Image (cartoon, helix red, strand yellow):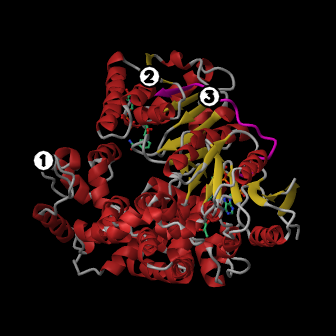
Amino acid sequence: MTNPVAIQNYDGIAVLLVDNPPVNALAKSVRQGLRDGMREILDDPAYVAAVIACAGRTFVSGADIHEFDLPMEGVGIDEINTLFENRSKPVIAAIHGVALGGGLEIAMGCHFRIATKDAKLGQPEVKLGLIPGGGGTQRLPRAIGPARAVELIVSGEPILAVEGLKLGLIDEIFEGDPIAAGVAFARRVLSESRAFRSLRDDDSKLASTRADRNLLTEAVNNAVKRDSGMDAPRACVEAIGWSLNVPFDEAIRRERELFLALKDGEQSKALRHVFFAERNSSKVASITSHVRPRAVNTVAVIGAGTMGGGIAQSFANAGIPVRLVEVTEEALDKGLATIRKGYDSTVARGGLSAEEAARRAGLISGAVGLERVEDADLIVEAVFETMQIKEDVFSRLSSIAKPGAILATNTSYLDVNVIAAATYRAQDVVGLHFFSPANIMRLCEIVRGKETAPDVLATAIAVARRIAKVPVVVGVCHGFVGNRMLSVSIAQARKLLLEGALPQQIDAVANKFGMMGPFAMGDLAGLDIGWRSRKDSGERLPIEDALCEAGRFGQKSGAGFYRYNQGSRTPIPDPEVEALIVETSRGLNIGRRDIEDAEIHERLTYPMINEGARILEEGIVERASDIDLVWLYGYGWPRQTGGPMFWADQTGLAIVANRLAYMAAIDRDTTLRPAPRLARLAFGGGTFGSLK
Ligand code: 3HC
Ligand code: NAI
C-alpha cells in the first residue's frame, strides 16, 4: 500500500501533504499516514512547525464513506488531533476546495487554519444520518460558539471561508498555492512568536451559553423545526450540548459512541445508499469516456402552462437564458404573469432578494410562434398531453430547430419513440420529464428513446445537473418509472376504499411512513384532470367519478376526497365522502371489513416494489438505486429509508415476495404475483442492491 501522506521539508517547516484522489477522503491509509507523519515531525528537532495541506482539487472532504460499511479499525481522528494539539510546534491547516466532516475536524485540531476565500467548510455528517464523530461537536462550538455550531451541524450546510474568518474559525484568507501559503504563515507565527492554543483548551466562546442555556434554545428550535423522522439532528444537538457541561475528553468519548451507534443504524445506511445512488445515476453504459456533451447556452420552452413556466424558471434560476414560446399572446402573457407572481411571492417570503428575482425573471423572454425557437441549443416541449399535438410540434421543430439542437419532450406518458419518429432527426430527441412544480421538484427522468444519441443523453444529464436537478435515465414505457409504479399503488388504494378503509385511514398510514397519502395527493393535483380524460376513454372509477360529478375536484374547489376550509390546505375528513364510499361498496356487492394499518401499508408498497422489479428486468433503468432516486426526489418517499428498492432489501425480499403471492391468491390478481426478478432474488437470498 503506498502512503498517501508525504512529508516535505521547507527549511524546517514540515508539510504533511495528503494525496488521495479524487477528494482526499480520510481513508484508513490517510489517517495512518497523518499519525505517523505527525509523530515523525514532533520527534525530529529539525522541524519547527507543521503545515497540513492537500494535493489535487480539495482539502480533506471527510471520512471515507465506503469504510462505514466495514468494521471501524485503524487510527482514529482523535489520535491524530491529539498529536496536532501538542504544545511544542505550531500546526497550520492550509485549506483549499472543501474541508468537510472529518476534514474540518482535523483542521480544527490544528492551532491555525488558513483558507482560500472560496473554500467551503462544513460538517455534513447529519446528511448521512450521523453526528460528527471526530470531535466536531466539541471543537466547533469552541471555535464559533454553540448557537452557530448548532446551525452548521444540524443543517449540514457548509459556509464559505470568508464567513469562517468572521466567525473565528479561519485565521486568514490566502490566494494561490496552499503549501506556499501555509509555509509563509508558519514562518510568520514563528517570527512573531505568536501564541498558539488548541481549540480544546479554549472555552471562551462557551462562557455565555454556560451561564444561560436559554441562549441555545432559539438556535435549537430553529434548527430542529419539524419532526423529519430522522434521528441524527437531535443526536447532533445532544452532543453539542455536552460541550457545555461535560469534560472535553469524556465528551469526545460519548461523541464517538453515539457516532458509532448511528453509523450502524438503518437510517445512516439508507442515507449513505442515497449518497452513492446520486453519484451513480449519471453513469450510463452507452456514455463512454469519449462521448462529449453538446454545448447548451440558450434554451427554448414550448408551452407556458403549469409545467412550461416552472421549467423555464429552473433554467433561469441557474443563469441560463430561456425563451418561452406560446401559440397566442394571451397564453404567453398569462404564463409570464404566473412566473412573475411566483418570483414576487418568493421575495415576499424572504427566499430571494428583489434584485436576484429581477435578474432571474429577466433571463426569461417570451415569444409567439414555434419558429422563434430557431436559435436555441435545447428545446423543451411542454404542450398539451395529446400525441397528435406533440407530433405536429416535433415535425415542425425538425426543420425549425438549428442542426445539433436537442429536442426534448416533457410528456408524462406518451411514447417518446413515436414522438421522435415525427422528426427526421430522432437521434436528437430525448424525454426530459420534470415533476410539478418543476421549479421546485428535483427529479428529472431522462427518457432515452431507441435512437437517442449518446451525446444527447450525456447533454441531458449534464444540463439537468447544471440546473440542480437529479437526473435518472429511464427507458420508454408507459408512465416511465415513477408514474408506472405509482399507478399500481393507487390501484390498491382504490381497492382498499371499496373493501372497508377510508381516505383518512389510508393517508394516515402513508403519513406515518413519512409520505403524503394518495388521497390528499389526489386532492392537491386535482381530481378533474383524470376524470376528463376518462370521459374520453370511457373508463370508469366509481368513487372519483362521483366526486367529480358532485363538483369535488380537490383543493381547488374546496372539496375532493376531503373538505377544505377556505384558504386552508388542511384535509378534513368528510362524512359525505364516507357515505359515498360505503354506498359504492354496497352497489358493487363488496362486503366492507376492518382493515389493519399493516395490511394497508403492505398493499400500498409491495406491488410498487414488484413493478420496480419488472422495470429492472426490462432494463428500463440501469440499477435499482435509480428507482430509489425517482421516488425520493419525485414523490417524497422518506429519505431515511433509502427509497423503495433499498427499503425492500432491508425489509427482506422473501417477506415481500411471500406477501405478494398471498395478495395475488386472495385477490385472484395475477399481476400481483411476484415478478420473476423479485422471485429469483427472494428465493436465492439476494437483494436489488447486489444486482449490477
Ligand atoms: N468518501 C468516499 N468517497 C467520496 C467521498 C467520501 N467522503 N466524497 C466524495 N467521494 C467520491 C464520490 O463517490 C465520487 O466517486 P465516483 O467518481 O466514483 O462516483 C467522487 O468522490 C467525486 O465526488 P462528487 O461527484 O461528489 O464530486 P464533486 O466535486 O461534485 O463534490 C465533494 C466533491 C464536495 C467532496 C462531495 O463529494 C461531497 O460532498 N462529499 C461528501 C462529503 C461528506 O459528506 N463528508 C463527511 C463524511 S462523514 C465524516 O467525515 C465523519 C467524520 O465526522 C468522522
Ligand atoms: P398546461 O395545459 O398547463 O399547459 C400547456 C400549454 O401549452 C398551454 O399554455 C398551451 O397554450 C400551450 N400549447 C399548446 N399547444 C402549443 C403549441 N403548439 N405551441 C406552443 N404552446 C402550445 O399543461 P401542463 O400541465 O403544463 O402539461 C404540459 C406537459 O407536461 C404535458 O405533456 C404533461 O403531460 C406534462 N407534465 C405535466 C405534469 C403536471 O403535473 N401538470 C407533470 C409532468 C409532466
Q: Which residue is mark 1?
A: 566
Secondary structure at badge 3 equals loop
Q: Position of residue 127 (x, y in %)?
A: 52, 62
Residue segment shown in magenta: 284-304
| Callout 1 touching callout 3 (CB < 8 Å) | no
Name the residue nearer the viewer: 458 or 50.
Answer: 50
Q: Position of residue 58 (x, y in %)?
A: 70, 51
Q: What amino acid is found at the position of numbered circle 3 in the picture?
A: Thr
Q: What amino acid is found at the position of numbered circle 2 in the picture?
A: Gly
Query: Is 350 a magenta residue?
Result: no
Q: Earlier in the sequence, mark 2 or mark 3?
A: 2
Q: To which quarter of the image does residue 337 belong?
A: top left
Q: Quadrant of the C terminus?
A: bottom right
Name the residue rendered at 45%, 61% in the picture: 205
Which-is-in-front pick, marks 2 and 1? 2
Q: Earlier in the sequence, mark 2 or mark 1?
A: 2
In the picture, the disc for residue 423 is 3
In the picture, the disc for residue 362 is 2
Residue 128's place in the image compared with 430, above or below, is below
Residue 321's place in the image compared with 6, above or below, is above
Secondary structure at badge 1 equals loop
Name the residue nearer the viewer: 202 or 21.
Answer: 202
Q: Earlier in the sequence, mark 1 or mark 3?
A: 3
Secondary structure at badge 2 equals helix
